[in-house]
C-alpha cells in the first residue's frame, strides 16, 4: 500500500471530523473567538482600511445568483470569496484580533472570514460552523508548528502563509468535501500561500495580508468542489511549502497526534497593538500602580526583551496610527499617561503629544537571552531623583496563563460592536454567538452584524 502524503492524511482527518469529535473546551474556545472576531471586525469595518475593503467588495464582488455572503458592518452581499477578503481585512484593521501561542499569528481573520462567508451563503447551521472553525484553526496551527520559527525569520508573515491552509479547511468543511477533494484543495491552497513581514510603517499593508488569504481559501475549496485537482505533496514535496518557506522545518508536526482530539490554544488581545508589545504595556501598567511612581518625573525607560522579538517595534516616532500600533515606545508612553492602550489611544492627538514624544524618546531596548519566553520583557523606569521601578512580564493579559475571562471578552465585544450596530443588536448578537450550536441558519446570525 502506498504511503499517504501529509496532505492526504490531514484530509482524511478533517473529512471525518464531526461536531461530537471536538472537545467541549475547544468548542467553547471557538465560540469565544467567534464573539471576539465579530466585535473586532465590526469596529474594523468602520476604519479607513475596512471601509476601502468593503467598497472594493461591493464594486468587484459580483451580485449574481451565486452572491450571498454578507459584509460585516455593512449588510450588503457579495460573492463568498470577495466577502471573505473584505471581512478578513476589517477583522485585522484595529490590532485587536486573537493570537496563537507559538508564532503570534491570528487565527480568525483567515479562518473565520472564510468559514463565515461560505456558511452564510450556503445557510449552514451552527454546529457545522463550529466544526469548520475548529478544523480550520487546527490546520493553521499544525502548519505553523511545522514551519516556525524559520518561516517568520525568513520574513514571511505567518498569518497569511499558514492561514491559507486553515481557511481552505474551514471552507471545505462547510462545503462537505470528501477527503480526495480536500487533498486537492490543500494543494491549491499551497499554490496561493503568500505574505511578507515587510508590512510595518505608515501604510495599511499589514491590514491587507489576511484578505487574499481568506479569499484564496474559499477559492481553493470551491475549485476542488468543481473537480479541479491539486498536488498531494504540497507540504513535503521537493518544491513544496516547507522547502520553499523555511530553512528548518518539522514535517512531523503536521500529523502529530492526528488520530487524537486536538486542543486549541487561543489567546486574546486586551490592547490595540501588536501582541509582542503587550508584555511591555503590562509592565508599564504594573509600574504605574507602584507606590511613589510619578510619570511626570520619568527620566528613562529601559527594556530588555527576548531575542525573538527584541529587534522589532522600536520606532520612537510613528507618523500614523498604523505605525503607532507597532511601536513599543509609543504604546508604553500612552499606557503610562492614560492607563490604557485601546484604539482611542492610538490617535493623531497622541502622535503629536509632546509628553508622549518625550517618554518615547526616553525608551531604550536591549536583548536578554536569559528571559524565559519569546515575548518576555523587563522594564526599569528611572525617575529624575534616581529611584527605579521595575516590572517583568512573561505572560501578558489574555494569554493562556493570564486569560481574559468570559465577562472581559463580552465587555470587549460590547465596547467594539455597540458603536456600530447599537447596544440592543450587540446584545442579541452576543447571545446568538454563545448559543451558536442551536442556530439553524448562520446567515440569520450574521444579519445582526450590519450597521445600525
Image: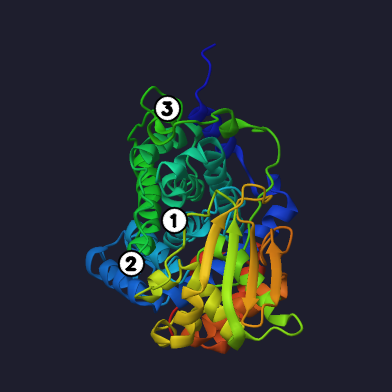
Please, which residue is most extreme toward the right here? 291
Mark 1 to mark 3 CA distance (whole Å) = 22 Å
The reply to whether callout 3 and callout 2 are in contact (CB within 8 Å) is: no
Q: Which residue is mark 2?
A: 204
How far across and down, in percent of the image, does residue 159 sit?
A: 46, 52
How far across and down, in percent of the image, does residue 123 sit?
A: 48, 61
Please report the residue visible at 60 percent of the width from the left and 67 percent of the height from the top.
280
On screen, residue 129 versus residue 257, left or right, reads left
Q: Which residue is mark 1?
A: 114
Q: Which label number is shown at residue 232?
A: 3
Dot 1 crowding, Cα within 10 Å, few <14, some 14–19, many 20+: many
Element at label 3: loop
Q: Nearer the viewer, mark 2 or mark 1?
A: 2
Q: Quadrant of residue 142?
A: top right
The reply to whether callout 2 and callout 1 are in contact (CB within 8 Å) is: no
Mark 3 to mark 2 CA distance (whole Å) = 35 Å
Q: Is residue 155 above or below residue 38?
A: above
Using the rendered image of the protein, determine whether residue 447 is visible from the camera's viewpoint.
no
Q: How is the image coloured?
A: rainbow
How far across and down, in percent of the image, does residue 300 sit?
A: 57, 74
Q: Quadrant of residue 53?
A: bottom left
Amino acid at each position: 500500500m502506498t504511503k499517504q502524503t501529509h496532505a492526504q492524511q490531514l484530509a482524511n482527518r478533517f473529512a471525518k471530523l464531526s461536531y461530537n469529535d471536538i472537545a467541549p473546551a475547544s468548542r467553547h474556545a471557538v465560540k469565544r473567538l467567534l464573539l471576539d472576531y465579530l466585535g473586532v471586525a465590526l469596529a474594523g469595518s468602520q476604519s479607513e482600511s475596512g471601509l476601502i475593503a468593503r467598497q472594493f467588495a461591493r464594486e468587484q464582488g459580483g451580485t449574481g445568483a451565486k452572491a450571498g455572503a454578507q459584509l460585516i458592518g455593512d449588510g450588503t452581499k457579495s460573492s463568498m470569496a470577495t466577502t471573505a477578503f473584505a471581512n478578513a481585512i476589517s477583522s485585522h484593521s484595529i490590532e485587536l484580533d486573537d493570537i496563537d501561542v507559538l508564532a503570534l499569528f491570528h487565527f480568525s481573520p483567515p479562518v473565520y472570514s472564510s468559514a463565515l462567508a461560505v456558511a452564510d451563503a450556503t445557510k449552514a447551521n451552527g454546529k457545522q460552523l463550529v466544526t469548520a472553525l475548529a478544523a480550520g484553526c487546527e490546520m493553521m496551527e499544525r502548519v505553523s508548528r511545522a514551519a516556525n520559527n524559520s518561516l517568520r525569520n525568513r520574513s514571511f508573515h505567518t498569518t497569511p502563509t499558514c492561514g491559507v491552509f486553515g481557511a481552505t479547511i474551514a471552507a471545505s468543511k462547510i462545503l462537505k468535501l470528501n477527503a480526495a477533494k480536500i487533498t486537492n484543495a490543500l494543494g491549491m491552497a499551497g499554490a496561493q500561500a503568500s505574505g511578507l513581514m515587510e508590512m510595518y510603517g505608515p501604510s495599511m499593508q499589514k491590514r491587507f495580508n489576511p484578505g487574499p488569504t481568506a479569499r484564496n481559501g474559499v477559492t481553493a475549496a470551491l475549485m476542488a468542489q468543481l473537480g479541479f485537482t491539486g498536488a498531494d505533496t504540497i507540504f513535503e514535496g521537493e518544491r513544496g511549502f516547507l522547502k520553499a518557506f523555511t530553512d528548518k522545518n518539522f514535517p512531523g508536526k503536521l500529523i502529530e497526534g492526528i488520530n487524537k482530539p486536538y486542543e486549541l490554544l487561543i489567546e486574546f488581545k486586551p490592547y490595540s497593538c501588536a501582541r509582542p508589545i503587550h508584555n511591555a504595556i503590562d509592565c508599564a501598567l504594573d509600574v504605574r500602580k507602584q507606590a511613589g511612581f510619578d510619570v511626570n518625573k520619568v527620566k528613562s525607560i529601559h527594556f530588555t526583551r527576548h531575542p525573538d522579538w527584541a529587534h522589532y517595534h522600536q520606532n520612537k516616532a510613528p507618523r500614523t496610527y498604523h505605525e503607532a500600533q507597532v511601536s513599543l515606545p509609543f504604546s508604553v508612553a500612552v499606557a503610562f499617561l492614560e492607563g490604557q492602550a485601546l484604539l482611542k489611544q492610538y490617535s493623531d492627538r497622541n502622535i503629536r503629544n509632546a509628553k508622549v514624544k518625550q517618554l518615547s524618546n526616553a525608551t531604550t531596548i536591549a536583548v536578554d537571552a536569559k528571559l524565559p519566553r519569546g515575548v518576555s520583557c523587563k522594564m526599569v523606569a528611572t525617575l529624575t531623583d534616581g529611584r527605579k521601578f521595575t516590572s517583568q512580564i512573561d505572560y501578558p493579559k489574555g494569554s493562556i496563563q493570564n486569560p481574559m475571562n468570559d465577562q472581559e471578552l463580552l465587555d470587549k465585544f460590547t465596547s467594539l460592536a455597540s458603536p456600530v450596530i447599537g447596544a440592543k443588536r450587540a446584545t442579541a448578537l452576543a447571545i446568538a454567538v454563545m448559543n451558536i450550536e442551536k442556530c439553524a441558519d448562520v446567515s440569520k446570525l450574521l444579519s445582526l452584524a450590519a450597521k445600525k
